[in-house]
Amino acid sequence: MHEQLCHQVVQNILSKKTTLLLSVLAIATLGSACTSNRESSSATLPSATQSPISTTQQSKEEQATITMSVIPWQVSAKQEKKLQPLADYLSKALKRPFKFEIAKDYQTAVNLLVEKKVELAYIGPGSYIEAHQRDPKIEPLVASINQDNKRPWYTSVIVANKASGIKTISDLKGKRFAFVSKLSTSGYIAPMAHLQKLGINPDKYFGSVIMTGSHDKSKQALVKGKVDAIADDRRSYTAQVKEGKIIPTKYNIIWESVPLPSVPIVASSQVSAELKDALKKALIEAPAGLKDPSGAAGVGYTLVQDADYDIIREFQQRVSSK
């Protein structure tokens, strides 16, 4: 009797000149009530009461490719190759095509996210803060755990060529120095905040200053003798030492920052709450050994929130106020 009544109400709704959207919503609501005693089906499967149009829209969303822009951490071709296993894993876990897009520079990665041209971005804390200022609905989801310290943080370092006679920051006076980008936390914001705390104006203190655009290019400039010292991410520097690209006996780490919150994977404001939850789950459960979006060996991810990056905001304010 209850099912007959529900069927009659549904037919009455369809007979009226209501919009298709209201009909679908009404049918879906009543359909749920009428089948309350039945075993619920998967949320990813279309209900028997869904219209062909709503089913088609859902199908298109499920088939749409999810794109994550990535800051140019390393040389793009090598970076893309390293990221393919992670892309394959996420495609399978989310049941949707997934790809990475290596941005040409830090600002481009931010713009792609803010302008909703990508769903996700792997951007440094400083870049995330700029993106969040431009669109407060942009949200950090997870951050990778550092392979070396097994914690969700990393540090900035200043690395100097021993042949240049540099042992301390005071020895940098008149030397050639390389930052990464003004949006790079470890490659600019953290070391710049420290230098300014010491009363050092890089433009006047150093013999010359360049922005290389990526951590890899900074280290290449150091190894090739184009600069005497660089600001870098310790993880990135250590990785190249392990790979034999840098001979550690030729260089000194003359300064290291306090722990900095790890680089987040950030969702644009167009990403639904359901997809955000699915992404968090997939990344938290990711198998060990997958490269993280920087191309480094991953040991897992942890949840993060906006307040975790307040320390970077403090550094930025210190830098911008000088």
Image (cartoon, rainbow, N blue to C red):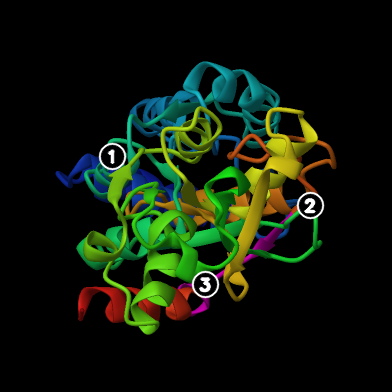
The residue carrying mark 3 is 305
Q: How many labels does the image show?
A: 3
Q: Residue 147 carries which label?
A: 2
Task: Tell which tag, 1 or 2, sits nearer the viewer.
Answer: 2
SS state under label 1: helix
Position of 181 with respect to 145 (left or right) is left
Tell me if residue 199 can be seen. Answer: yes
**Badge 3 local density, few (<14 within 10 Å), some, or many (20+)?**
few
Magenta stretch: includes residue 33: no
Q: Quadrant of the C terminus?
A: bottom left
Front position in the image: 79 or 284: 79
Q: Residue at x 29, y 49 (%)?
A: 209
Q: Is residue 296 placed above or below 201 in the rendered structure?
A: above
State yes or no: discs 1 and 2 in contact (Cβ < 8 Å): no
Position of 74 with respect to 321 (left or right) is right
Q: Which amino acid lies under the numbered mark 2 shown in the image of this protein? A: Gln
- Does label 1 or label 2 sit earlier along the sequence? 1
Alpha-carbon span between mark 2 and mark 3: 21 Å
Please state the horizontal and vertical placement of residue 188, each as a whole percent of the image: 39, 59
Q: Which amino acid lies under the numbered mark 3 shown in the image of this protein? A: Gln
Magenta stretch: includes residue 302: yes
Q: Quadrant of residue 294?
A: top right
The residue carrying mark 1 is 112
Task: Tell which tag, 2 or 3, sits nearer the viewer.
Answer: 2
Span colored in magenta: 301-308
Q: Which amino acid lies under the numbered mark 1 shown in the image of this protein? A: Leu
Front position in the image: 204 or 100: 204
Alpha-carbon span between mark 1 and mark 3: 21 Å
Front position in the image: 114 or 188: 188
Q: Is residue 217 placed above or below 15 in the rendered structure?
A: above
- Does label 2 or label 3 sit earlier along the sequence? 2
